[in-house]
Amino acid sequence: MSTQIQLNIDHTIIERRKAFYRRVFDYQPVDHLPVYIWVTGSKDRDYTLRSELESTQRQFQVNLEAIARTLKLVPDDYIPTVRITQGYMTIATLFGIGMHWSDDTGQPPGIREHLFKELGEVYRIHRPSMEEGIMPENVRRLRYFSENLPADVYLTGVDNGGPLNNLKDLLDTNLLYTSFYDDPQAVHYLLNLLTDVQLEMHHTLINTVGAINRFACLDFDPLWHPEKYVSFCSDDVCATISPKIFKEFSIPYNNRLYQPWGSGGLHNCGPHPCKQLYLDHQPRVKYLNCSHRYTKNEYREFRSLFAGWGILEPMFDSGETAEEMLAGYWYMMECLAPDTIAIPYCIVDQTWSDDDISSIYNEMRKISEEYARNMKWIV
């Protein structure tokens, strides 16, 4: 391994934790619910997010630092996973759209421009190969991580959105929202093409490492998920459309991403105007990865919608303090128990001390034990 950091991982412990997550996701009784501590960044004084995203070696090192630190500070629940990404816009770059970096080195890249200004142009688009855009570097990076990490460290796929999210990058913003009404045939044409490309991309990622079970998730979610729930689709656009539009232009294409590998997760930071339809996917969505900030007002509705089946994964991704995370998790429990499980993501960066990280896990664990005692389990 090309690093001075040595990971001390007990295979037996990891297997026991995987069995624990399988029970949680199947609503089987446990003594506590998982609390996920997501350590980001690096204590390297020269670290920036841009420096990490642009370099395989830097991203590898940052991931190793986070794993070693979490293994040391978090006594339970944690299954090591590396997050592999250059940014969310892989599909866009396959179609020739350039990446745009802002002057803020703490911000991820976006797209340089939209590809289409008129709907009639979409029929001239070519289907790209996996040798275009940033995909070859994604493959090299994924291969490097898989070959230089022990088998008990799991991988994410690259952050690649979902069909509707990727459509957003191809179409000018105004055109995106008017096209659902002005030319739905053109929208379906593009969504079919984008879904074909994304499925090929997923197969390429799996073939690169040799087995789907090496992944914690086929997309960006760094939590380890049971094997039958490893599929994933990001659909942040559904925060801004009606349930009718979601049913026609999201669900059929999201379904195609789930079907080869079974149920999985949906990401939408929030809000959730289409939440009544989330479980209408075939196969049914198993979990929702979301932002606590933009979802908290809808927890009580998710209690009945997801009861006995779905999992919420609310992220504390808005710079919340430890006190705000604890209050937020308590609120989740009050809104969702005894019917629906939530797994909170406590995102902590390099400014958190070791004592801070240990403390937030231990305090969240107390709530998780009460949450488990209050649950209505399927037995």
Image (spheres, rainbow, N blue to C red):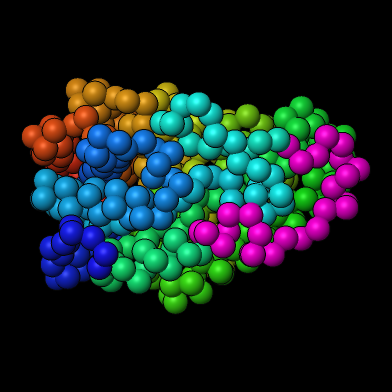
Task: State the image quarter where residue 20 is shown.
Answer: bottom left
Q: Residue at x 49, y 54 (%)?
A: 158
Is 124 inside the magenta-drawn segment? yes
Q: Residue at x 18, y 41 (%)?
A: 368
Q: Main secondary structure of the magenta part?
A: loop
Quadrant position of the N terminus in the picture:
bottom left
Q: Position of residue 174 (x, y in %)?
A: 76, 27
Q: Residue at x 80, y 39 (%)?
A: 116
From what the image shows, is residue 360 above or below residue 57?
A: above
From what the image shows, is residue 363 above or below residue 230?
A: above
Q: Position of residue 246 (x, y in %)?
A: 67, 40
Q: Residue at x 68, y 40 (%)?
A: 169
Q: Position of residue 97 (x, y in %)?
A: 69, 45
Is 254 inside the magenta-drawn segment? no
> Is 310 in front, or is 38?
38
Q: Position of residue 145 (x, y in %)?
A: 36, 64
> Is 41 in front, or is 237?
41
**Left or right for 198, reference 51:** right
The answer to whether residue 311 is visible is yes
Task: State the image quarter where residue 259 is shown.
Answer: bottom right
* Figure label count: 0
